[in-house]
Every structure is written in structure tokens, then in C-alpha cells.
Image: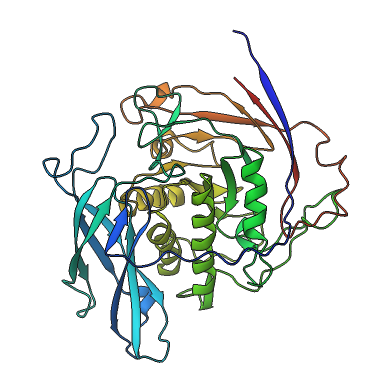
Amino acid sequence: MASSCLGLLAVLLAVGGAVGHPPRVQTVSEATMYHVAHINLTTEARSGVNPFLVNITATITPPSFSTSPTPPLVRRATAPLSVPGFFYSEDDGSGQWVFAFRFSCDAVGSWAWHITSDDADLNNMGGAVNCEQNSDPAFHGRLEVDQSHPHHFAYQDGTRYFMVGTEVDWLWALDLDNLSTHTLEPFLDTLSYGGFNNIMVNLYANYSAWARKVPSPPNVGNTVNTPWGSDYLHLNLRFWNHYDDVMAALERRGIVAHIMIMVENKAVQWPQEQSVADDLYWKTTVARLQAFNNIVWDVSKEAQRLSDSYWASRFPFLVKYDAHNHIRTMHSHWNASLELKVWTTTRLWWSVGWVAKQKTNKESAGKMRTTTTLSWHCSKGVHDGIDESNSKAAAHHFLHFVCVCV
């Protein structure tokens, strides 16, 4: 078969600008298809209670087909969604706590919601969100494996998707410790202008000392803000709110975030595996981010030390709490057992530049219908031969050569 390649040399620089910090997702009584619907739940603050450990489940009932006609090729929710809630805002002096839940509606009409919680003040709360038609060309619903062409990707509304991606591990760190720097938005504008529609990013990683011949950056030190607050059972809301801003900024540009949840090679002191604190980290990740449609879940990065049994506990965790059923994969640990692999929906291998290569996983036929393999190949010397000493990059921002072969 004939093959053609398009080589793109993109200079990925974080350039300061006058763009203001993007607004966080807001609570709504009306929403737009394929956008984040964020609903706040307010209750009285109480001493002796850890609000991060309050259990909240929102059951969201979609409108019926009879009241919300949908094109026959567009897949949409036909059964109630069950999404976890999360603690959203500390007591600001008003004596109140704010919890929240999020979802993304994929049909026009009224979406009713009902809360089940171990907090008596939150339990049995209810309401409805009116969902309107989407007109923003950057929003197409979830990224999925195309059911009709299982070696390809497509958005929920049927729009075709061919990935052109790069890795920006510390994207979330831009502006996190200094909100006045305004580097995130212009940096993403540069990526978008270069045609990138997919970014591989850590959920969190606090240190890197593997710069090799590349001058600092990208030798990254500890960040002031981490996912955790005073301890592993109290989270740092500034970190998580800022991650919301990053996700929203990516989504506005039609860029998918391939999020690596557990990064093992960056000197992070993670909570004890399968502990209450570990579950809190994972559950908060899913609860806060699942309503964004521009997500690929990647459970691991360089996490070979962790056992199959740990990942076997995390994949069902994603399935249980991610009502929107985003793509799931593993960056590493592909020597895992077949029993573990069936929890994935795609198999992705990454490095610096893409070459797309796709196949069916025949081993798990009947359990996992498709496997899409995206193999990345790094040309020797791409990093070592580049002088980045004058780069304005604020974090792990390399020069990338992207070769897309079809």
C-alpha cells in the first residue's frame, strides 16, 4: 500500500501574554450538549467531619427519545448515569461547604438528578438541568473507538478523529504556582496552530532529573502545589481547580488530554496502594474530570513495580465511577495478564512522534471488541542535537518532530 508522510517541525514554547486566566467551570441549571454541566450542592460546614470523605452519588436521568429526537447514528445515554460527587470548596467564612457533581449531556431536553449521600443534608437533594443543542465546532462529544470501523477513532457525534499528538508532561504546572504568569493559554494556542489535537500529560509528577544532554528546563523540581493538602486525606483544591482550567482550555481548542493518572518514575510519594487515601485520589480524578469529553484515561506511566493485582483494582474503579465510559489504556505494564488487559479499550504506545498502527486484539475476542495500537517512534538525536538554552518554556516543553504516516 502506498504511504505518504507529513513531517511537521513544531517549536513548542510557552510565551507570556496578556490573556487572562480562563474561567473555571460554573454551576448551571441550563447546559449545552457535550459541555461540562457542573452542579453545586451546599450544606453547613461541621467540625469533626472530613468533607473529602463524604460519599455522594448523583443519579442523572436523560430525557426520553420521544421528547428528544436524536439522529440515528449518534450514540447517546438511554439509561440513568451514576456519577460520584466531590468536595469542591472550603468554608469561606460563610459557614458552608460546597460539594459538586458533573456530567455531560448528549441529548436535548431535561436531565433530572437525584443525590444519594451518607451526609443527611445532601441526601435526597434533587433538581434538573435543561440541555440545549451544541453549536460550538470544537465540541463533538466523547472520543471513542468507532464501532463501525473498530481500527479508527471518532467522536460521539460521528466526527472523524485522526490523532496528531505530542507529550507535555507538566502542562498542568503552567501558571499553577503563579497565576499572574499567563503562559498556559498562549502555549496551547501555539500547539493548536501547529495542528496538534492530542496531548499526553501527567495528572501529577513532582520531579524529573533525567534531562540528559538537554539543559534545564526540562529538569523540573518540586512544585509548591500538589494534589494533597495537609495530608493524603485532605486535598489541595487549588491544584484540582487549576487542573479544571487546563482541561477546559484544552477542550475549547479541540485538544484531547491523554491523562496518565499514576506516574511512578518522578519521585512522587504516593498514598499506600488500595488505601482510603489512594481511593480518594483516584475517585476525585474521575469525579472531577469525567464530564470533560476530551479525555483518554491512562492508568500508569513507568509503573512496572506495581503488581497486576493493583491495576486489577484500579481498572474496575474507573469503570465503576466513569459514567461516560472514556477510553482506557496503560502506558506501561503491558506484560500484564490477559485478565488485566480486558479492562482496556485501547493499547497505546508513545514516544516523541506518531506513526499510527492499528490492530484487533484476537486474544480477548468476546471480552474486548477492539484494540487500537498507536506506535510512537522517536528519531535518534531529536533531543540531543537541539539547543534549548534560550527556550522560554516554563516546564517540560520540547521541540518535537511529528511524522504522521497514512
Residue 320: x %, y % from top left: 31, 52
Quarter the C terminus occupies: top right
The one of 312 and 292 positioned closer to us in this rendering:
292
Task: Give the image's coloring scheme.
Answer: rainbow
Residue 169: x %, y % from top left: 64, 52
Quarter the N terminus occupies: top right
Vertical placement of residue 240 versus 192, above or below: below
Residue 236 visible somewhere in the drawing: no
The one of 92 and 266 positioned closer to us in this rendering:
92
Residue at 82%, 54% (x, y): give it.
391
Which picture quadrant has residue 337?
A: top left
Left/right placement of residue 200 relative to residue 10 reads left
Residue 340: x %, y % from top left: 42, 40
Which picture quadrant has residue 332?
A: top right
Residue at 39%, 37% (x, y): give it.
339
The one of 264 and 140 positioned closer to us in this rendering:
140
Residue at 49%, 38% (x, y): give it.
336
Q: Residue furthest top?
A: 1
Q: What is the total number of numbered labels drawn onto the structure image?
A: 0
Residue 24 visible somewhere in the drawing: yes
Residue at 55%, 33% (x, y): give it.
163
Vertical placement of residue 38 versus 361, above or below: below
Left/right placement of residue 147 relative to residue 180 reads left
Left/right placement of residue 6 relative to residue 370 reads right
Residue 58: x %, y % from top left: 24, 62
